[in-house]
Amino acid sequence: MITGASRGIGRSIALHFAQEGAFFIVHYGKRRNEAEAVVQQITQNGGNARAIGANLSTLDGILDLFVALDYIIQERISDNLFDILVNNAGIGQVINLEDTTEGSFDEVMQINVKAPLFVTQQALPRLQDGGSIINISSCVTRVASPSVFTYSMTKGAIDTFTHLLAKQLGTRNITVNAIQPDIINTEMNAGTLQNEEGQKYAAVLQSLTDGGSRTM
Protein backbone atom coordinates (compact mmCIF):
# COMPACT_ATOMS: atom_id res chain seq x y z
CA MET A 1 0.00 0.00 0.00
CA ILE A 2 1.25 3.45 -0.97
CA THR A 3 -0.30 6.47 0.74
CA GLY A 4 -0.61 9.64 -1.31
CA ALA A 5 -0.02 7.85 -4.61
CA SER A 6 -2.18 9.96 -6.90
CA ARG A 7 0.71 12.21 -7.96
CA GLY A 8 4.36 13.06 -7.48
CA ILE A 9 6.73 10.67 -5.76
CA GLY A 10 3.90 8.33 -4.70
CA ARG A 11 2.69 8.00 -8.28
CA SER A 12 6.20 7.20 -9.50
CA ILE A 13 6.61 4.55 -6.80
CA ALA A 14 3.28 3.01 -7.83
CA LEU A 15 4.28 2.83 -11.49
CA HIS A 16 7.61 1.26 -10.56
CA PHE A 17 5.93 -1.36 -8.36
CA ALA A 18 3.60 -2.16 -11.22
CA GLN A 19 6.57 -2.87 -13.49
CA GLU A 20 7.81 -5.32 -10.84
CA GLY A 21 4.51 -7.20 -10.93
CA ALA A 22 3.15 -6.14 -7.54
CA PHE A 23 -0.54 -5.82 -6.73
CA PHE A 24 -0.97 -2.75 -4.58
CA ILE A 25 -3.30 -0.09 -3.25
CA VAL A 26 -3.11 3.47 -4.55
CA HIS A 27 -4.30 5.64 -1.67
CA TYR A 28 -5.51 9.18 -2.29
CA GLY A 29 -6.86 11.96 -0.11
CA LYS A 30 -8.86 14.29 -2.37
CA ARG A 31 -7.55 13.55 -5.88
CA ARG A 32 -9.78 10.67 -6.89
CA ASN A 33 -9.54 11.33 -10.63
CA GLU A 34 -5.74 11.40 -10.52
CA ALA A 35 -5.63 8.17 -8.48
CA GLU A 36 -8.00 6.42 -10.86
CA ALA A 37 -5.81 7.60 -13.75
CA VAL A 38 -2.79 5.97 -12.09
CA VAL A 39 -4.72 2.72 -11.68
CA GLN A 40 -5.91 2.89 -15.30
CA GLN A 41 -2.38 3.41 -16.58
CA ILE A 42 -1.19 0.43 -14.58
CA THR A 43 -3.99 -1.90 -15.68
CA GLN A 44 -3.61 -0.88 -19.33
CA ASN A 45 0.01 -1.99 -19.09
CA GLY A 46 -0.96 -5.36 -17.64
CA GLY A 47 -0.54 -4.48 -13.97
CA ASN A 48 -2.97 -4.74 -11.09
CA ALA A 49 -3.90 -1.99 -8.63
CA ARG A 50 -6.88 -0.54 -6.81
CA ALA A 51 -7.55 2.97 -5.51
CA ILE A 52 -8.84 3.81 -2.02
CA GLY A 53 -9.75 7.30 -0.84
CA ALA A 54 -9.37 8.20 2.82
CA ASN A 55 -8.75 11.28 4.95
CA LEU A 56 -5.56 10.50 6.86
CA SER A 57 -5.77 13.58 9.12
CA THR A 58 -8.08 11.73 11.52
CA LEU A 59 -7.95 8.30 13.13
CA ASP A 60 -11.46 7.58 11.85
CA GLY A 61 -10.27 8.19 8.30
CA ILE A 62 -7.31 5.86 8.80
CA LEU A 63 -9.59 3.15 10.18
CA ASP A 64 -11.82 3.57 7.12
CA LEU A 65 -8.76 3.08 4.91
CA PHE A 66 -8.01 -0.28 6.51
CA VAL A 67 -11.60 -1.46 6.38
CA ALA A 68 -11.48 -0.92 2.62
CA LEU A 69 -8.01 -2.45 2.38
CA ASP A 70 -9.08 -5.59 4.25
CA TYR A 71 -12.05 -6.04 1.93
CA ILE A 72 -9.94 -5.70 -1.23
CA ILE A 73 -7.20 -8.06 -0.05
CA GLN A 74 -9.66 -10.66 1.21
CA GLU A 75 -11.26 -10.65 -2.24
CA ARG A 76 -7.94 -11.92 -3.61
CA ILE A 77 -6.68 -14.18 -0.82
CA SER A 78 -8.04 -15.77 2.33
CA ASP A 79 -6.57 -13.24 4.78
CA ASN A 80 -5.80 -9.52 5.00
CA LEU A 81 -1.99 -9.67 5.04
CA PHE A 82 0.26 -7.62 2.77
CA ASP A 83 4.01 -7.13 2.30
CA ILE A 84 4.97 -3.49 1.82
CA LEU A 85 3.80 -0.19 3.30
CA VAL A 86 4.98 3.11 1.82
CA ASN A 87 4.22 6.12 4.02
CA ASN A 88 4.41 8.75 1.31
CA ALA A 89 1.39 11.02 1.87
CA GLY A 90 2.46 14.48 2.97
CA ILE A 91 1.96 18.18 2.45
CA GLY A 92 4.57 20.83 1.82
CA GLN A 93 4.50 24.11 3.68
CA VAL A 94 6.64 27.18 3.01
CA ILE A 95 6.15 29.13 6.24
CA ASN A 96 8.82 30.55 8.54
CA LEU A 97 8.63 30.48 12.33
CA GLU A 98 7.32 34.04 12.65
CA ASP A 99 4.34 33.33 10.36
CA THR A 100 3.48 29.88 11.71
CA THR A 101 -0.02 29.66 13.20
CA GLU A 102 -1.66 26.98 15.28
CA GLY A 103 -3.76 26.03 12.26
CA SER A 104 -0.81 25.73 9.87
CA PHE A 105 1.15 23.75 12.46
CA ASP A 106 -1.72 21.32 13.09
CA GLU A 107 -2.35 20.85 9.36
CA VAL A 108 1.17 19.73 8.50
CA MET A 109 1.59 17.67 11.68
CA GLN A 110 -1.63 15.76 11.07
CA ILE A 111 -0.65 14.57 7.60
CA ASN A 112 3.15 14.34 7.88
CA VAL A 113 3.49 12.86 11.40
CA LYS A 114 0.17 11.72 12.86
CA ALA A 115 -0.91 9.88 9.70
CA PRO A 116 2.25 7.76 9.25
CA LEU A 117 2.20 6.82 12.93
CA PHE A 118 -1.40 5.58 12.98
CA VAL A 119 -1.30 4.11 9.46
CA THR A 120 1.70 2.07 10.57
CA GLN A 121 -0.01 1.11 13.83
CA GLN A 122 -2.95 -0.29 11.89
CA ALA A 123 -0.67 -1.92 9.31
CA LEU A 124 1.51 -3.86 11.76
CA PRO A 125 -0.95 -6.72 12.49
CA ARG A 126 -1.51 -7.03 8.72
CA LEU A 127 2.12 -6.76 7.60
CA GLN A 128 3.82 -10.02 6.72
CA ASP A 129 6.95 -11.01 8.64
CA GLY A 130 9.84 -10.29 6.32
CA GLY A 131 7.97 -7.34 4.84
CA SER A 132 9.02 -3.74 4.44
CA ILE A 133 8.07 -0.24 5.57
CA ILE A 134 9.35 2.71 3.52
CA ASN A 135 8.93 6.22 4.94
CA ILE A 136 9.39 9.26 2.69
CA SER A 137 11.44 11.83 4.58
CA SER A 138 13.31 14.80 3.07
CA CYS A 139 16.72 16.36 2.61
CA VAL A 140 15.55 19.28 4.79
CA THR A 141 16.41 17.16 7.84
CA ARG A 142 20.10 17.55 6.92
CA VAL A 143 20.19 21.36 6.53
CA ALA A 144 18.80 24.40 8.32
CA SER A 145 16.01 25.77 6.11
CA PRO A 146 13.96 28.34 8.08
CA SER A 147 11.52 28.93 5.21
CA VAL A 148 10.09 25.43 5.74
CA PHE A 149 10.27 25.45 9.51
CA THR A 150 7.45 23.17 10.61
CA TYR A 151 7.74 20.95 7.53
CA SER A 152 11.38 20.29 8.43
CA MET A 153 10.30 19.36 11.96
CA THR A 154 7.83 16.81 10.61
CA LYS A 155 10.48 15.11 8.49
CA GLY A 156 12.85 14.98 11.46
CA ALA A 157 10.07 13.17 13.30
CA ILE A 158 9.80 10.69 10.42
CA ASP A 159 13.52 9.91 10.68
CA THR A 160 13.20 9.22 14.41
CA PHE A 161 10.07 7.17 13.77
CA THR A 162 12.04 5.09 11.26
CA HIS A 163 14.82 4.33 13.74
CA LEU A 164 12.30 3.29 16.40
CA LEU A 165 10.36 1.05 14.02
CA ALA A 166 13.52 -0.62 12.74
CA LYS A 167 14.50 -1.47 16.32
CA GLN A 168 11.02 -2.76 17.22
CA LEU A 169 10.39 -4.80 14.07
CA GLY A 170 13.79 -6.41 13.62
CA THR A 171 12.61 -9.56 15.37
CA ARG A 172 9.99 -9.94 12.61
CA ASN A 173 12.57 -9.39 9.86
CA ILE A 174 10.64 -6.34 8.70
CA THR A 175 12.98 -3.77 7.17
CA VAL A 176 12.25 -0.11 7.85
CA ASN A 177 13.90 2.67 5.83
CA ALA A 178 13.45 6.39 5.27
CA ILE A 179 14.25 7.97 1.92
CA GLN A 180 15.47 11.59 2.05
CA PRO A 181 15.06 13.04 -1.46
CA ASP A 182 16.32 16.42 -2.56
CA ILE A 183 13.78 18.86 -4.01
CA ILE A 184 12.03 16.85 -6.73
CA ASN A 185 10.22 18.47 -9.65
CA THR A 186 6.73 17.34 -8.68
CA GLU A 187 3.36 19.07 -8.44
CA MET A 188 3.94 19.84 -4.75
CA ASN A 189 7.13 21.76 -5.56
CA ALA A 190 5.86 23.45 -8.70
CA GLY A 191 5.45 26.78 -6.93
CA THR A 192 9.05 26.68 -5.71
CA LEU A 193 10.68 25.59 -8.94
CA GLN A 194 8.77 27.73 -11.41
CA ASN A 195 10.58 30.95 -10.46
CA GLU A 196 14.24 31.95 -10.47
CA GLU A 197 14.52 32.39 -6.71
CA GLY A 198 13.05 28.97 -6.10
CA GLN A 199 15.46 27.39 -8.55
CA LYS A 200 18.40 29.08 -6.81
CA TYR A 201 17.15 27.83 -3.44
CA ALA A 202 16.84 24.27 -4.80
CA ALA A 203 20.37 24.44 -6.22
CA VAL A 204 21.83 25.66 -2.91
CA LEU A 205 19.94 23.01 -0.97
CA GLN A 206 21.16 20.33 -3.34
CA SER A 207 24.77 21.44 -2.89
CA LEU A 208 24.41 21.37 0.90
CA THR A 209 22.98 17.84 0.86
CA ASP A 210 25.65 16.30 -1.38
CA GLY A 211 23.35 16.47 -4.39
CA GLY A 212 21.42 13.26 -3.97
CA SER A 213 18.75 11.36 -2.11
CA ARG A 214 19.71 9.20 0.85
CA THR A 215 18.23 6.12 2.44
CA MET A 216 18.52 5.44 6.14
Image (cartoon, rainbow, N blue to C red):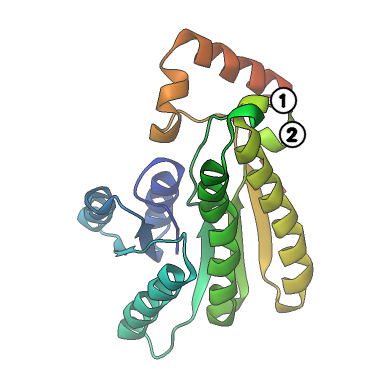
Q: Quadrant of the N terminus?
A: bottom left
The amino acid pointed to by label 2 is Arg
> Pointer 2 and pointer 1: residues touching (CB < 8 Å)?
no
Residue 138: quarter of image: top right
For the point 36% across and 85% down, the residue is: 74
For the point 27% across and 56% down, the residue is: 39
Lower sequence index among marks 2 and 1 = 2
Classed neighbour count for the residue bearing mark 2: other residues with Cα under 10 Å, few (<14), some (14–19), many (≥20): few
The amino acid pointed to by label 1 is Asp
Seen from the viewer's position, the closer of residues 193 and 172 is 193
| Residue 58, above or below 150 | below
For the point 36% across and 64% down, the residue is: 54
| Label annotation for residue 210 | 1
Where disc 1 sits, the SS reads loop
| Label annotation for residue 170 | none
Where disc 2 sits, the SS reads helix
Residue 67: quarter of image: bottom left
Residue sitting farthest toward the top: 196
Where is residue 170 drawn, in percent x and y? 76, 72
Where is residue 12 drawn, in percent x and y? 41, 44
Where is residue 149 drawn, in percent x and y? 65, 33
Residue underneath mark 2: 142
For the point 43% across and 12% down, the residue is: 195
Classed neighbour count for the residue bearing mark 1: other residues with Cα under 10 Å, few (<14), some (14–19), many (≥20): few
Tell which tag, 2 or 1, sits nearer the viewer: 2
Where is residue 196 drawn, in percent x and y? 48, 8
